[in-house]
Amino acid sequence: MKTTSKIQVPKDGWAGLKENFAADMTAGFVVFLLAMPLSLGIAKASDFPPIMGLITAIIGGMVVSLISGSKLTIKGPAAGLIVVVAGAVADFGGGEIGWKLALGAMVVAGIVQVGFGFLKLGKLADIFPLSAIHGMLAAIGIIIIVKQIPVLLDVNPELYKGLTIVSMITSIPTFFANFDPRATMIGVYSLAIMLGWPYIKDFKLGKIPAPLMVLIVAIPSELAMDFAHTEPAYALLHIGSLTDNLNFNADFSGIAQSGVFIKYVIMFALVGSLESLLTVKAIDLADPFRRKSDNNKDLIAVGVGNTLSAFLGGLPMISEVARSSANVNQGAKTRWANFFHGMFILVFVLVATPVIEMIPNAALAAMLITVGIKLAHPKEFVNTFKIGKEQLAIFLVTIVFTLVEDLLIGIAAGILLKVILHLINGASFKTLFKAPILVSSNGNNYLVEIEEAAVFSNFLTIKKKLEEIPSGFNLTIDLKNTKLVDHSVMENLHRFQHEYEENGGHVSIIGLDNHKPVSDHHLAARKLVVE
């Protein structure tokens, strides 16, 4: 790489704050406008006090940014964890008791995440099949949409309290039969703004973040219709005072329900870490300065943030993809943008709580339904099908088991199906977990020969060997002796190729001439054709 590009990379730490103050503060302010209503909505949908979403975002910004291993990601409550959080509150008894017992499991999960970082498990995302991960996210999207439909329609919460997701799906006609016309009107045009805003991004008005535009329209509408006096209490958001809510709220007596407690510790730690690592990977690719995050350090930072947040009553946080993408697009240079986003939320909640309590819940539901639509968009199904029918099967199985059972069962079902398909396609049970690899070198050339099978479950051994090769060489990855190369490995190898070549090396992936792709997609799985 050229020396000039190294000089242009923004400084870190206090020097970075001085150098990039204006750019990072501006980006942090825009992200705050996006994050504040979403954090409130995510907390409410998770059956947490809404203000706890803001506490999570404040800690994610002002504390975690100081120790994080990534430069441009925004830490805060995640829509993708709504399902897990609400499930924990319900399974621990619901209401305030369920909330506090769920916090106990979250504290332990945060400590587990710190352990993941120290054990250098930042590569965790690489051992899960991509189709199962996308299926998990799509299932979460469907659940968010279904759970927010009655909120958008301003239905009495007693109508859907305690219902399973399957029961809520079958109850949708009942929700429509009991909708509130005035609140629903606000919900519908809020949803229209959220969905339509990307199409006017080329206009000056389109520069305003969509959630802020929703509030600009929804709050005056609510005031004009005098919701405070004409609608039930559940039509408006109520958050209370930050200082009154700031206590040590976690309760560890839920450990007596060992099965439930362990289940949610695993789910918070696993799903939260996966989502966070996937976001870090995506934002690294979008970073104009091509900086590579320290995944292990970032896991430790998120774990510390989650432990502190859960003690105080907040939700679990991750590196959140929508807010992080907005941060990059707004020209953020360093992790101080994340700090500023948290600082602006703190200032706003201290001085403008009455304004926050003017927000109609139907408007927040519209924002969350938009998040759900992005996660479970029809194009996700189409793209998965294009990669291969087997990938679609894994994707759908993960979704169905998540909807019928829970997230942990859904991921496990997707992985199990993937393993079965690999065994059917010629991979031996032994090579599922460790691929035979031979690395040799000759001058500036390295040759990596992989045998038997290159699949998601043994990719960590492959990745370890690849990362041991110094940068700047001519590297050939030879797959001719494999019987099977799955989609996850194809995508990970191409990502490795991109990153290695960014650092001045060259990568050739060869040996697939006798392998038949399962579809026309360039990253489809390949099976060796035996003549």
Image (cartoon, rainbow, N blue to C red):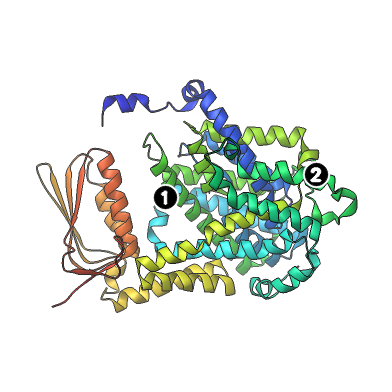
**Quarter of the image holding residue 290?**
top left
As helix, strand or loop, the secondary structure at mark 1 comes to loop
**Precedes in sequence: disc 1 or disc 2:** 1
Which residue is under mark 2? Answer: 240
Left or right position of 53 against 456: right
Nearest to viewer (mark 1 / mark 2): 2
Quarter of the image for the C terminus: give it: bottom left
Q: Is residue 158 visible?
A: yes
Q: Amino acid at mark 2?
A: Gly
Which residue is under mark 1? Answer: 122
Outermost residue toward the left in this view: 442
**Quarter of the image holding residue 289?**
top left
Q: Position of residue 408 (x, y in %)?
A: 53, 67
Quarter of the image for the N terminus: give it: top left
Left or right position of 463 against 531: right
Q: Amino acid at mark 1?
A: Gly
Residue drawn at x 86%, y 57% is 232
